[in-house]
Image (cartoon, rainbow, N blue to C red):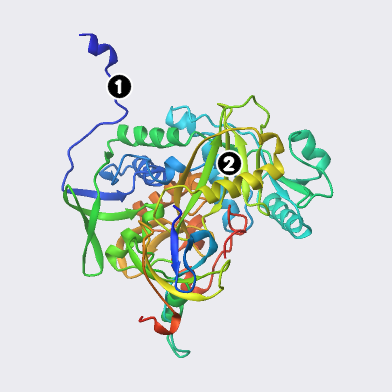
Amino acid sequence: MVLQLFKKSQMWRKPDLKNRYEVVIIGGGVHGLSTAYHLGKLGLTDVAVIDKSYLGGGGSARSTAIIRANYLTPEGIPFFRESHKMYENLSQELDFNLLFNQMGRLDLGHTDSAVYWLNVRAGFNQLLGVNSRVIDPNEISELVPVLDLRKGKTMPVLAALYHPPAGVVRHDAVVYGYARAADRMGIELHPFTEVTGIIKSNGRVTGVQTNSGQISAGTVVSATAGWSSTISTMVDLDLPITTYPLQAFVTEPLKPFLDKTISSANLHAYAYQTDRGEVVIGGPVDPYPTYSQRATMNMLEDLSVFILKLLPILKPAKILRQWAGLCDMTPDYAPILGKVEGLDGFILNCGWGTWGFKAAPIAGKTVAELVATGQTPKLIQPFGLDRFENGRLINERAAATAAAIH
Amino acid sequence: MAFLVPCPNCGERNVYEFRCAGEIVTRPNSDAPQSERTAYLYLRKNVAGEQREWWYHKLGCRKWFTAIRNTVTNEVTETAWPDETVA
């Protein structure tokens, strides 16, 4: 039959939903799938990943997919550094081309105070084995000749934190790669299966209620990013999370002119040029919390004004599309990972705000270790929910948008 | 998604004129246990649906008020002055 010619090869199976799994992961984005994949690597394959929509359709689909490790805190830097290393080998590991383009990144400083913080970050980065250093405008103009480096304008570029290994990875490919690898290990993927309730007995989570029936589980992992509060409320757990949308837009494809990721905390904007030539431009989260994923004209105008201060060459470029994704912002710009006191069998993998995509490999690995062994790996011990009670907040000010809100 | 907020003083205005100061939480007494103070400072319901929250008309009359807003549809159904707000 001629139709056979167009038969699609399936990336993963479509098994029937069972009524019991050892581990149920809520959320089929990069974090849920990475956790599943690493559980499989540890030999735990009686695992189901369930998602209310298609796989990778939430934050993973909307991320601007920048990978970097040049953070500020002694807790954050090693965590993101390990994730960065894992991304460097992930294409080979998953046997799937993730189009990782290690283009390098410049964090621009426009004020003395911003330059001070860039120096602090460079110092911490170098101490903790992350390749980054502060460079002057001469070197910046060699790396990014199109950048507006005129002196005397408002927000002149004084210096930049140069982070050569930073890059951009194809976000959908990460989802597909992890999903296919997990599926090949025997882990089940169940898109379009919405969790409607979580079953609890004697202070222990024992399963989930879905629109396709009840599933009992030894452990339930919540990896739902922007929707984390809607899941945790099912077990009467309040989280230090507020959901804000983050908007981004792309221009029409242009000839290659920008081969670095550039970002400015003072101007609340970042940009890079994709392999297709489109320039991706993003900024801070919206000024008000909402679960709506619709983009706004006001943000488009603001972001355009900000980015034109850095890249005036973009002025005649047409805008192709704009979108918004949900960010589960935490008060200290760090994730929330690990067990919940007084609620056995429920593991949090959330608080991903604007820094989640770049952390998916290491978060999946460490959370999988926690699920498999019951012990919280050292790398994620500072990110427990109990840090808010103990006053051990992390204050990761080098996260995107951290400078813009609060 | 942009929307209009009905300021009780100025009427309907673009949401970008306002500052949303988040859902209303009740401040515990000074002798309250640590857990209650943690909850007040950090923990939020963050509901996907209607919630009562603080708003400030920063580019208008510069008055604080409370509003009931649906965080999914961004429809503001009710506004009140702080002293008229029922918790």
Q: Secondary structure at mark 1?
A: loop
Q: Is residue A70 left or right of residue A182?
A: right
Above or below, B29 against A270 in this view is: below
- x 35%, y 58%: residue: A347
Q: Quadrant of residue A123?
A: bottom right
**Residue A161: % across, % down:** 72, 47
Q: Is residue A7 left or right of residue B52?
A: left
Q: Is residue A216 left or right of residue A167?
A: left
The residue singled out by tag 2 in the image is: A281
**Residue A202: % across, % down:** 21, 70
The three-letter amino acid code for the residue at tag 2 is Ile
Above or below, B31 against B50 in this view is: below
Is residue A242 visible to the viewer in this orientation of the structure? no
Q: Is residue A271 left or right of residue A35?
A: right
The three-letter amino acid code for the residue at tag 1 is Ser
The residue singled out by tag 1 in the image is: A9
- Residues at marks 2 and 1, CA–CA distance in whole angstroms: 34 Å
